[in-house]
Amino acid sequence: MVSPNQLTVLRMAFVPILILMVVYEYLGIAILVFFAAGITDMLDGLIARRMGRKTPLGTYLDPIADKLLLVSSFITLSSTSLDLIVRIPLWLTITVISRDILLVLSVLVFSLAIGRRQFPPSVLGKYTTACQLFYVMVVLVSNFIGKPVPLITIVSYVTLALTVASGLHYMSQGMLLIRSESANEEK
């Protein structure tokens, strides 16, 4: 049986294939690869939770795989050097990447300062990831069919709103953690 970690590594392997398919304008294949990556994401979580196969490695690999897939997709699909009909706006790509960099740096700093801790994703963070994945798929489909999918602009603003809201939520959680650690040190 396939392990959740193997599925996560497979999702990581899909990233360069996806990017190459977009760059070389094999958009139908790019959509299939992106969809397959989404399926592996769903399956690895399902197997890990339902079958009790969560591992410490998986708790690190899964968000890394998500970030690789999303950041690579956002950068590629916002590139002005590609012949795309619909691009992800640069302001949205910058917002998504900035949030992710802040999250990764915050986790790293907390881990170094406080020690190893679990930082489970919040519900808002999960909705944000799902919306970002959906938006990438909408942009891929729009380029495949040669015109923007209806409501694409609304989806981009919802993606922006969720990205900012989840970033602020994680910041507030980080501040609470810092306050809690400071209070523990004073005792």
Image (spheres, rainbow, N blue to C red):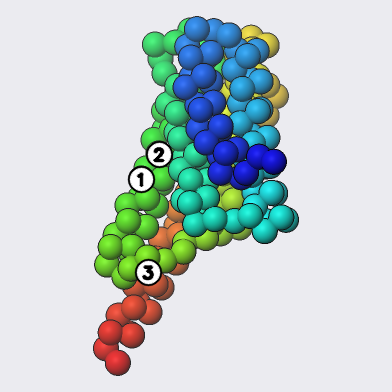
Question: Which residue corresponds to mark 1?
Answer: 101
Viewer-side residue, 173 vs 8: 8
Amino acid found under the numbered disc labelled 1: Ile
Q: Are marks 2 and 1 in contact (CB under 8 Å)?
A: yes
CA gap, disc 3 and disc 2: 21 Å
Secondary structure under badge 2?
helix
Quick one: which residue is furthest to the right in this view? 50
Asked which secondary structure carries label 1, the reply is helix
Select label 1 or label 3 by which is in front: 1
Choose top left, top right, bottom left or bottom right for residue 124: bottom right
- Which quadrant: the N terminus? top right
Q: Does residue 112 sit above or below 19 in this rendering?
A: below
Picture layout, residue 52 above or below residue 137: below
From mark 1 to mark 3, how far is it between C-alphas?
A: 17 Å
Question: Image point 54% across, 26% down: which residue?
Answer: 14
- Foreground pick, 47 / 66: 47
Residue 129 at x, y = what percent?
Answer: 57, 44
Tell me the amino acid under the disc marked 2.
Ile
Q: Which residue is mark 3?
A: 175
Residue bearing the label numbered 2: 97
In the rendered image, which quarter is residue 10 located in? Answer: top right
Q: SS of the residue at dot 3? A: helix
Percent x, y for residue 153?
60, 30
Callout 3 amino acid = Met
What count of labels does the image hold? Answer: 3
Question: Mark 3 or mark 1, which is nearer the start of the sequence?
Answer: 1
Instruction: Assess disc 3: are there few (<14), some (14-19) or many (≥20) residues with their C-alpha within 10 Å of its C-alpha.
Output: few
Q: Is residue 112 visible?
A: yes
- 8 relative to 103, above or below: above
| Residue at 39%, 11% in the rendered image | 81
Seen from the viewer's position, the closer of residues 21 and 50 is 50
